[in-house]
Image (cartoon, rainbow, N blue to C red):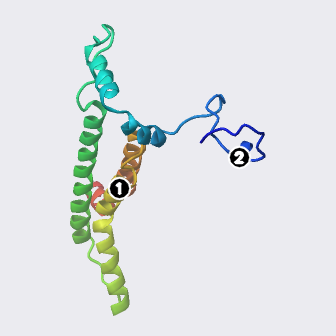
Amino acid sequence: MPRTPAPDDDAALRWDELDDPSYVESDAAIAARAPAVAGDDAEAGAASLTDEAPDAGTEPPAPGGPALGLRLLTGLFALVYLAWSVGWIIGIGLVPLSGPTVLLEVLYQFSEFLAIIASALWFAAVVALTRDGRAAHRIGWLALGTLVLVPWPVVLGVLA
C-alpha cells in the first residue's frame, strides 16, 4: 500500500509502515510473496544456497528422530489399550450379573459394551485431538487413559 503524502487520520489503523519496529510480516504473507520472485533471481538464490558449505559444528538432524519416538510410544500405548479391551472382555465374563428387570439388564449390557470400547475411543480421541500438538501432551493423555481404563474386574479377580 503506497504511503500518502498528507497526514492521514486512519494511518494508526494500518500496518503498512515497514520502518515501524513493531511491524511483523506473517508467514502467510511471506509465502504469498515468494512466487513473485522471478527467473534469474530465484535461480541465483538457489545456486548460492547449494554452493555454500555447511558449518563444521552442525550435524544434520537424525531422520525421524522425535517423530519416530512418538510413533513408537503411540504404538506401545495402542497395544496397551488393546490389552485393556481384551481385559474388559475377560472381566465381564468373570462377573456374571443380571438385572431383575429387562430395562436394568439392557442398561447393564450397554455399560459392558461401553467398558469394552472405552479404551479404543480414548485412544482414537487422543490421537485425533493431539495430532498437531506437543508430544508431551499426547503421551500424558495416553498415560492418563491407561490408569483410568484399567480392567478392574480382571485386576481384582487376579488379586482375590
Q: Left or right of 29: which side holds 121?
A: left
Task: Classify 10 Å Cα crowding around label 2: few (below 14), some (14-19), many (20 and above).
Answer: few
Q: Say above or below: 3 vs 116.
A: above
Q: Left or right of 135: which side holds 92?
A: left
What separation in Å lies between label 2 and label 1 (alpha carbons)? 39 Å
Residue receiving disc 2: 13
Quadrant in which residue 86 is drawn: bottom left
Residue receiving disc 1: 128
Q: Say above or below: 56 vs 21.
A: above
Q: Say above or below: 130 vs 51.
A: below
Q: Residue at x 62, y 39 (%)?
A: 2
Image quarter of the N terminus: top right
Q: Tag 2's secondary structure?
A: helix
Q: Say above or below: 115 vs 40.
A: below
Q: Nearer the viewer, residue 104 or 155?
A: 104
Q: Amino acid at mark 1?
A: Ala
In the current view of this chain or complex, which residue is farthest to the bottom? 101
Q: Nearer the viewer, residue 135 or 152?
A: 135
Instruction: Point out residue 9 in the picture as x, y percentages from the top left corner.
Output: 78, 46
Quadrant in which residue 59 is drawn: top left
Instruction: Point out residue 139 in the picture as x, y percentages from the top left corner.
Output: 37, 43
Nearer to us: label 2 or label 1: 2
Q: Tag 1's secondary structure?
A: helix
In the current view of this chain or complex, which residue is farthest to the front? 5
Q: Is residue 150 visible?
A: no
Q: Residue at x 32, y 86 (%)?
A: 105
